[in-house]
Amino acid sequence: MELSERQGTLPKAGFSQPATRILIIEDDVVLSNLVADLLRKHGYLVRQCFDGCSGLETATKEGFHLLLLDVMLPEMDGFKVLNRLRRKSDVPVIMITARGAEADRISGFKTGADDYLPKPFNIEELLLRVEAIIKRTQRVHQIPAEAAPVLLEFASLTLNTGSQAVMYEDTALDLTDMEFKLLAELVEHQGQVLSKPYLYHELMGRPYSREERSLDVHVSKLRRKLNSAGFNAKQLRTVHGQGYCLK
């Protein structure tokens, strides 16, 4: 069994809704069924695919709130699936793989993954990560009527919180949802050092772990896109041992 046996008392899926749809793309039938049954018990609607090609086709033709995507898949590996999916969709994706190498995690994030969970994983951790992403995306797409869009500005950089449009002078930046949220947080608190624990809590909805590198990858990708637009990305500073600052 790939899932951890330390089940105990499972957390309730407080952010699950009847319409929350999850697609599992995993060729291990036993593991896929275990995860699917677990998610269904917590109120999610689940579809399963067992190879990369059928997974990509299902993901692009049907609407899902989240994908659980294995890396080692027959016909088409998870990285290729994600790369092709990102041409058409920004649906959140958690990469799941038996390979724990940092290079694989970085490859997943560079391709557009939102999170990364190595096998074998603990059931509670899987649920918490799923719930954190569902909560985050629901918060982004369900803006209260009274919450008018806000324009954030910093050194000729303009962000529209309503449309998530980002402009540097006359150049539009194509940012992912996470990159926009990260930049908006830094602009809102410009001049302040935001710690990694704070950013993990605010942006990803989960505690910070010293082994976690996902935030570093998002910052690196954001810097490259800012540089490409002509913005001096050195203003997005890494403060050693503390966090990040836009200054």
Image (cartoon, grey):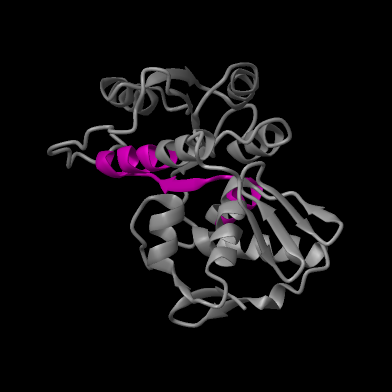
Residue found 38% across the figure and 65% down from its top: 197
Q: Is residue 141 left or right of residue 4?
A: right
**Direction right: furthest residue:** 170
Which is more toward the observer, 3 or 42?
A: 42
Residue found 13% across the figure and 37% down from its top: 9
Highlighted range, magenta: 106-133
Residue 48 position (above or below residue 246): above
**Direction front: furthest residue:** 146
Q: Is residue 228 left or right of residue 103?
A: right
In percent of width and height, residue 161 lies at: 61, 48
Residue 147 position (above or below residue 195): above
In percent of width and height, residue 193 lies at: 49, 76
Residue 231 covered by magenta stretch: no
**Direction left: furthest residue:** 8
Which is more toward the observer, 229 or 6?
A: 229
Examine the residues drawn in magenta and state their main secondary structure. helix
In percent of width and height, residue 45 lies at: 40, 18
Residue found 41% across the figure and 47% down from its top: 118
Residue 82 position (above or below residue 161): above
Residue 43 seen in the current view: yes
Quadrant the C terminus occupies: bottom right
Q: How many marks?
A: 0
